[in-house]
Amino acid sequence: MTTQKKPLIVPRLPGDNFAAINRLVETGGKDDGTGEQAPEAAPKKERAAQTRRLTVYVPKALLRKLKLRCVHDELTLSDAAAEALSAWLEKRPNN
């Protein structure tokens, strides 16, 4: 009788995607056992008071590029979207 291994589950933290991926690559997908505390995320109520949810539909290829770039730049998708929308609005004339 063979036993199945449980998949490794690594908690994701805002802004820590790149570090988490590097840790998995360096350890071969195993926990490195450092026991380091991750930085605390802003409390949910605080974030909710400052932001609102927005659902957008984008082509799959664009979403994939966005996700990869966010990991590379250590950004959340929300931060990248807010930055892009702000830049887009700046280019538009105020009517």
Image (cartoon, rainbow, N blue to C red):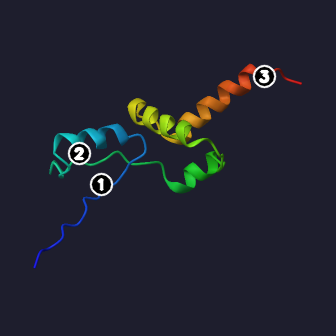
Instruction: Name which residue type carries label 2.
Output: Leu
Q: How many marks?
A: 3
Question: Disc 2 versus disc 1: distance between alpha carbons?
Answer: 9 Å
| Label 1: element kind | loop
Q: How far across and down, in percent of the image, does residue 31 sit?
A: 18, 52
Instruction: Name which residue type carries label 1.
Output: Val
For the C terminus, which image quadrant?
top right
Relative to 2, 21 lies left or right: right
Q: Are the residues flagged by discs 3 and 1 in contact, CB closer than 8 Å?
A: no
Q: How far across and down, in percent of the image, does residue 67 sit?
A: 47, 39
Relative to 77, 21 lies left or right: left
Residue at image location 69% in from the left, 26% down from the top:
88
Instruction: Name which residue type carries label 3.
Output: Arg
Question: Disc 3 versus disc 1: distance between alpha carbons?
Answer: 42 Å
* Callout 3 crowding tier (Cα within 10 Å): few <14, some 14–19, many ≥20: few
Q: Are the residues flagged by discs 2 and 1 in contact, CB closer than 8 Å?
A: yes
- Which labelled disc corresponds to residue 10? 1
Question: Disc 3 versus disc 2: distance between alpha carbons?
Answer: 43 Å
* Callout 1 crowding tier (Cα within 10 Å): few <14, some 14–19, many ≥20: few
Residue underneath mark 3: 92
| Label 3: element kind | loop
**Quadrant housing residue 45:** bottom right
* Lower sequence index among marks 3 and 1: 1
Residue at image location 55% in from the left, 43% down from the top:
60
Q: How far across and down, in percent of the image, does residue 77 sit?
A: 52, 41
Q: Are the residues flagged by discs 3 and 2 in contact, CB closer than 8 Å?
A: no
The image shows residue 47, relative to residue 76, as above or below, that is: below
- Which labelled disc corresponds to residue 24? 2
**Quadrant housing residue 39:** top left
